[in-house]
Image: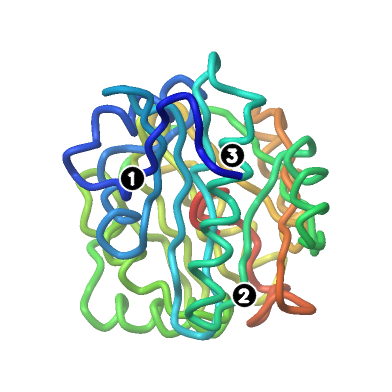
Amino acid sequence: MALTDGLREIVLSADDMVGALALSDEAGWNQTADDWRIFMESGEAYGVRAGDRLVASAAVLPFDGGIGWISMVLVTADWRRRGLASHLMNRCIAALRARGAASLLDATPEGAHVYGQLGFATQCAMVRWRGQGQGKGGAMPVTPRLRQRLLERDRDVFGGDRGILLESFMDRDGSFVVSSDDDFAIVRRGRKAMQIGPLVAGSADAGKALLEQAIAIAEGPVIVDLLDAGSALAPVLEAHGFEAFRTFERMILDRDALPGQPSALMVAIGPEFG
């Protein structure tokens, strides 16, 4: 579609941060300025302006390995149902295809119907849980050796190199890592809650142990996005009083299956990052 009504498409930069945060805040999402900055600097974020107001957005984050993530598809309430989301989605798909990359995303049930019409196919489900951390402290420092090991492990499991993303999380104030051998979880502060993820583990027992540690150390509201591969971890969340309140579908375009080792990716970073 061509934009009408005096609308203007732009590539978002740091100058658009206030408008971008207004969109994600309106939707009740957990992104910080640091999260938006990753899209603006390591990927591309697109927007639509009506006058001086940012009314819609979408973003792509390419990863080495021939895949890329699409997210931050947001339209402010009074500009919905005018084709802006579809327009920006097509821009994102085209940007990734130009790189020879398949497109991945996490969609709400309503979004999954729309994305299915664009050719996306559902690969697995994801359930968002919310609860409270125990705030017991005890996080251990991340040594250079541990950092390198978990980046390599994540690359194998996710099927693409998202080291820039994970490095950003680990370098933020309040972030911490729990690990055992090659299994790990990263916990970071979001705008509204701490978020556990990714959690990578070779077995359900290992995943449960990491999740227990992460909940014990985290403080305040906590979000966990549990993938199908981590469904055995749900009893841990229930035992700590967490509740499931939202579902997503992990979808892919221009590729037949999820890359990497999906069975070991038990908790996602979040629907915006994979």
Q: What residue is at 76 percent from the left and 61 percent from the top?
A: 120
* Nearer to us: label 1 or label 3: 1
Q: Amino acid at mark 3?
A: Ala
Tell me the distance, in whole angstroms, between the alpha carbons under discs 1 and 3: 14 Å
Marks 3 and 2: in contact by CB < 8 Å? no
| SS for callout 1 | strand
* Nearer to us: label 2 or label 1: 1
Residue 245 placement, left or right of 172: right
Q: Which residue is mark 1?
A: 10
- Mark 2 and mark 3 lie on one chain; the one further toward the N terminus is 3
As displayed, is residue 48 above or below residue 35? above
Q: Which residue is mark 2?
A: 102
Q: Which residue is mark 3?
A: 85
Residue 98: give x, y in percent of width and height. Answer: 50, 77
| SS for callout 3 | helix
Residue 208: give x, y in percent of width and height. Answer: 64, 57
